[in-house]
Amino acid sequence: MPQDVETNYMEEITRLNAAARELVTITALLQGIFFAVVSLSDVRRLMQQWQLALFMIPLILWFLCLIFSMQAFVPREYKNDRTPEMLKKASDLKFLWLRLAYLMLLISLAFLMLDMALYFFVLPPPQTSCLPICGTPTVTPLP
């Protein structure tokens, strides 16, 4: 019976580690996309300070999500002790870190939606200068 309990807890810990890896992947992907969008657009020139702060909140929450997700990977005192009590404690601790990471991810997505609404509906459109291919072409006669 104790071997069954140990196997069940080890499987649960393996599943929690896989979930933590997925959260790390999703968060890193979101950060990369967000940095690309912000760097390619001219967001800073269009915004006031409080609006820029709103754009920073998802990044801060994503970093917290990464930290909490990676805490699930860190072996603690249960590394060498495989008693059912210690494995349950390890599983509960990993689950707590993952719940916190998931909460940070959900809150960051809400702020991301707020940022998108601010960008598309509140901010004025950027003033673009006409590129050389715009406008009427000038034709010069051949000599």
Image (cartoon, rainbow, N blue to C red):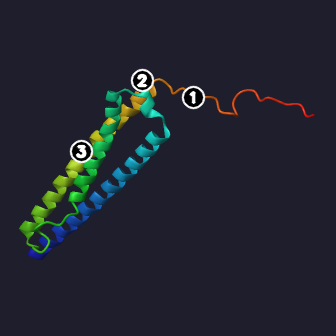
Name the mark on residue 122.
Answer: 2
Q: Residue at x 12, y 70 (%)?
A: 5
- Do the CB atoms of the residues marked 1 and 2 lie less than 8 Å apart? no
Amino acid type at mark 3? Leu
Left or right: 114 with respect to 139? left
Quarter containing the C terminus: top right
Name the mark on residue 52.
Answer: none
**Mark 2: secondary structure:** helix
Q: Quadrant of residue 140?
A: top right
* Earlier residue among tags 1 and 2: 2
Please, is residue 132 above or below residue 30 in the view?
above
Dot 3 alpha-carbon crowd within 10 angstroms: few under 14, some 14 to 19, many 20 or more: some
Please, is residue 46 above or below residue 84 in the view?
above
* Residue holding disc 3: 103
Amino acid type at mark 2? Val
Q: Quadrant of residue 131?
A: top right
* Earlier residue among tags 3 and 2: 3
**Mark 1: secondary structure:** loop
Which numbered disc, 1 or 2, marks the residue closer to the eye? Answer: 1
* Residue holding disc 1: 128
Horizontal and vertical percent position of residue 84: 8, 69
Query: Residue lying farthest right?
Result: 143
Of the pair 88 and 65, the residue shown nearer to us? 65
Left or right: 127 with respect to 55? right
Horizontal and vertical percent position of residue 122: 42, 23
Please, is residue 93 above or below residue 133 in the view?
below
Quarter containing the N terminus: bottom left
